Amino acid sequence: MSHLDTEAPDRPSRSGSAIQRLLFVVDAAVADTAELPAAARAMIDSATEVYVLTPTLPGRLAWLADDIDRCRHIADERLDTVVGHMRSIGVDANGAAGRGSVLTVVADAVADFTPDHILIALRDSEHANWQERRLIEHIQERFGVAVTTYAVDVDGHPTSA
């Protein structure tokens, strides 16, 4: 697992990109594109294709009670926000709001999109829920795809992952 640093790496062109297909799993969106960590922005800019996935992330009680409508609405709004961010920086991204457990929706996206890198924007540890515990380790073990992460606080500012 790699964590983003604050220094901007060299930015390869889209045609010479080492990342062809970037799966961008967004548990928390930054307030605006200026808040994207420099290394994440460079990764997004250099990818040939970007697919955005926003999991529903219900809490335990909502999950058990099958009361996840509010969580679905939030995931839909997050998807609209992130795809809007991507388009505002010239990245033609599409995606979906995932319905189901985080690992299930990531597995479906990996099977359908076949990414060669996964970028994950997590909620900061203070606001993460049960589905996000050990998520990075599970993704690395299960899919064998390079994973990069960063965390976002409730105000949309990046924090340490």
Image (cartoon, grey):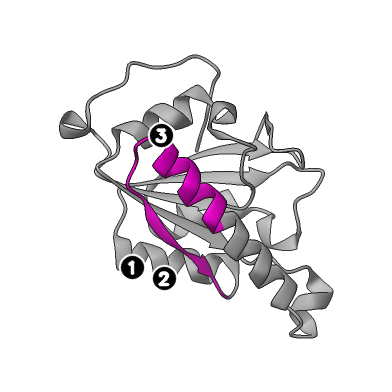
- Please identify the quarter of the rendering in which residue 113 is found: bottom left
Residue at (64, 71) in percent of width and height = 72
Q: In this view, does 67 lie above or below 38?
A: below
Q: Does the magenta stretch include residue 84?
A: yes
Determine if residue 147 is in view.
no
Q: Name the residue under label 2.
A: 108
Dot 2 falls on a residue whose secondary structure is: helix
Mark 2 and mark 3 in contact? Answer it, CB < 8 Å. no
- Residues in magenta, as a range: 79-99
Q: Mark 1 points at which residue?
A: 111
Give the amino acid type for the residue marked by disc 1 in the picture: Ala
Q: In this view, does 139 lie above or below 111?
A: above
Mark 3 and mark 1 in contact? Answer it, CB < 8 Å. no
Q: Where is residue 85 in the image (x, y as percent from the top left)?
A: 49, 42
Q: Does the magenta stretch include residue 24?
A: no
Q: Quadrant of the C terminus?
A: top right
Q: In this view, does 156 lie above or below 24?
A: above
- Please identify the quarter of the rendering in which residue 3 is found: top right
Q: Where is residue 74 in the image (x, y as percent from the top left)?
A: 67, 63
Other residues around mark 1 within 10 Å, as few (<14) / some (14–19) / many (≥20): few
Q: Earlier in the sequence, mark 3 or mark 1?
A: 3
Q: How far apart are marks 1 and 2 (CA)?
A: 5 Å
Q: Is residue 154 above or below residue 98?
A: above
Other residues around mark 3 within 10 Å, as few (<14) / some (14–19) / many (≥20): few
Dot 1 falls on a residue whose secondary structure is: helix
Give the amino acid type for the residue marked by disc 2 in the picture: Asp
Residue 89 disc label: 3
14 left or right of 30? Answer: left
Mark 1 and mark 2 in contact? Answer it, CB < 8 Å. yes
